Image (spheres, rainbow, N blue to C red):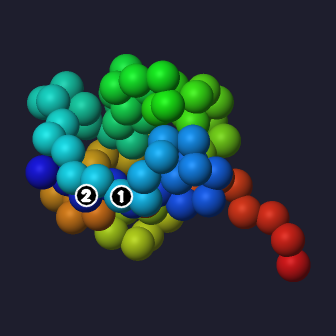
Amino acid sequence: MTKLVYFAWVRERIGKGEEEISLPAEVITVGDLLNHLKSLGEEYETALQFPETIRVAINMEHADHDEPIAGAREIGLFPPMTGG
């Protein structure tokens, strides 16, 4: 099981702050994860319709979309940050 934590409007659109899910073996990278999540339902598809804008942290460390997720204890998904 992998713990996913959702922040800001990603959380609002998915409708939950976190969940634990089992990932299929073919989900290897952050990009694979985002594509898999989009297949879980309309709320996920809406939240992740522009995956290139989603920022990801693996075990609280920022990760690129081509980074492997093997061994991740927690994966956070959040929109781009702005402000000052």
Q: Position of residue 12 (x, y in %)?
A: 58, 50
Q: Which residue lies most toward the bottom here?
A: 84
| Neighbourhood count class around disc 2 (C-alpha, 10 Å): few under 14, some 14–19, many 20 upward | some
Q: Position of residue 76 (x, y in %)?
A: 43, 59
Q: Is residue 63 visible?
A: no
Mark 1 vs 2, N-terminal side: 2
Residue 57 is marked as none
Callouts 1 and 2 close, C-beta under 8 Å: yes
What amino acid is found at the position of numbered circle 1 in the picture?
Glu
Q: Residue at x 70, y 55 (%)?
A: 80
Residue 3's tag is 2
**Residue wearing tag 1:** 18
The mark tally for this picture is 2
Percent x, y for residue 66?
Answer: 43, 40
In the image shown, does 53 or 8 lie closer to the viewer?
8
Identify the residue at horizontal 57%, vertical 36% (top origin): 47
User: Residue 57's image quarter?
Assistant: bottom left
